[in-house]
Image (spheres, rainbow, N blue to C red):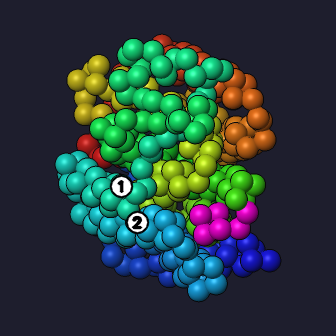
């Protein structure tokens, strides 16, 4: 009942606030116009992050009233909230003014630093290999060590903790931002990730604030998706994409085993981002320059309907999320992830070679 209450408050708040926010976006001129990499029709509001933020905060307020965080969780969740506010402000300014890439990066780094300063960082992870021997080799031991109490836990050397955590947060923010190209795609995949985080946390620790935060986020997202699924009447915008990426990255750090869940649920977007960044750098382009080379755009340009592509992404995210939660074998998880990675990279390579002419690049930032 308590879980449904948190989820329901987020959902209802988002449902009630999305229509007025949509009107406000049109009044302020914060809309996506057809052209460039987007091929929608008409002027679509792009302040979807606002109702998501309002629904998420409504759920958080209820969590603090009924189940306030204690101990270390109190500090870490405070960092998630403060960082969410900073990333939301920066994203709102970007939606309004189209910030230059360097200023976008400033806001993203500032939010990441807030999280890290509140001890939301990656300092250890479960050994994914069958034996701990690799981590004790000469090269690997420079960067990692084994936990003295539990040799299945790999500890990251202190000088690397901040660097890895920063890259994780920035990478997830931009992975979600890149994914936001089709109606309901980024929002739906993020919803699945948040629900998987909540389910996995509940399995491991029961009802805790760390379990409830992603549940509140998932409720807000589902309320928003009513208006965002194809055909969308409001887009996530930068406010939504950055907010989701930031929270998926930080919430995945907080509870045991959710990092691996994030890697499996978000495998396709992460691989797509990695492929594109390398491809753009090889062509001498800015890695964040918008174009239609993303996997979802290529599938759309190949003739697949929007809903089919989006539902395909959903099915993949659900399947690998369930693998992360219910499959106990670490080797099987790694094998399945490598299988998915191989399939996605082969598909991307085939689609790249199939392209007969260069795709136009646009000045709009993703």
Q: Residue furthest bottom?
A: 65
35 or 63: nearer the viewer: 63
Res. 256 visible in picture:
yes
Residue named by callout 2: 79
Asked if the residue at tag 1 contacts the one at tag 2, i.e. Cβ–Cβ closer than 8 Å, the answer is yes
Residue depicted at x 23% and y 23%? 284
The residue located at (23%, 48%) in the rendering is 101
- Judging depth in this view, the residue of 102 and 204 nearest the camera is 204
Where residue 315 appears, as percent x and y from the top left, is 72, 41
What span is colored magenta in the figure? 206-212
Counting every numbered tag in the picture gives 2
From where the camera sits, is residue 39 visible? no
Looking at the rendering, which quadrant does residue 275 occupy? Answer: top left
Residue lying at the far front in this picture: please name it. Answer: 148
* Residue topped by disc 1: 116
| Distance of label 2 from label 1 (alpha carbons) | 8 Å
351, above or below 120, in the image: above
Secondary structure state at the residue bearing disc 2: helix
């Amino acid at each position: 009942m308590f879980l449904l209450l948190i989820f329901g408050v987020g959902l209802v708040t988002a449902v009630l606030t999305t229509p007025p926010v949509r009107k406000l976006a049109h009044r302020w001129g914060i809309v996506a116009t057809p052209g460039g990499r987007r091929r929608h029709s008409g002027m679509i509001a792009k302040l979807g992050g606002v109702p998501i933020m309002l629904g998420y905060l409504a759920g958080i307020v209820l969590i603090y009233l009924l189940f306030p965080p204690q101990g270390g969780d109190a500090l870490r969740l405070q960092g998630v909230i403060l960082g969410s506010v900073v990333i939301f402000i920066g994203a709102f300014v970007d939606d309004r003014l189209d910030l230059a890439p360097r200023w976008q990066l400033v806001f993203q780094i500032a939010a990441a630093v807030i999280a890290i300063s509140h001890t939301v960082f990656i300092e250890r992870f479960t050994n994914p290999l069958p034996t701990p021997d690799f981590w004790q080799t000469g090269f690997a031991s420079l960067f990692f060590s084994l936990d003295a109490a539990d040799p299945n836990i790999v500890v990251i050397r202190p000088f690397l903790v901040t660097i890895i955590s920063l890259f994780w947060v920035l990478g997830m923010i931009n992975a979600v931002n890149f994914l936001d190209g089709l109606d309901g795609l980024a929002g739906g995949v993020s919803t699945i990730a948040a629900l998987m985080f909540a389910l996995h946390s509940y399995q491991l620790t029961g009802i805790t604030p760390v379990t409830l935060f992603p549940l509140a986020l998932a409720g807000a997202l589902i309320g928003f998706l009513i208006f965002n699924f194809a055909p969308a009447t409001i887009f996530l915008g930068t406010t939504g994409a950055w907010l989701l990426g930031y929270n998926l990255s930080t919430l995945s750090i907080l509870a045991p085993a959710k990092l691996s869940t994030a890697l499996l649920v978000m495998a396709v977007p992460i691989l797509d981002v990695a492929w594109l960044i390398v491809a753009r750098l090889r062509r001498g382009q800015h890695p964040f320059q918008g174009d239609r080379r993303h996997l979802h755009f290529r599938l759309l340009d190949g003739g697949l309907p929007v809903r089919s592509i989006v539902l395909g992404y959903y099915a993949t995210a659900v399947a690998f999320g369930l693998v992360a939660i219910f499959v106990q074998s670490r080797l099987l998880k790694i094998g399945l992830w490598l299988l998915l990675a191989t399939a996605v990279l082969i598909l991307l390579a085939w689609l790249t070679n199939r392209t007969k002419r260069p795709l136009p690049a646009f000045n709009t930032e993703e």
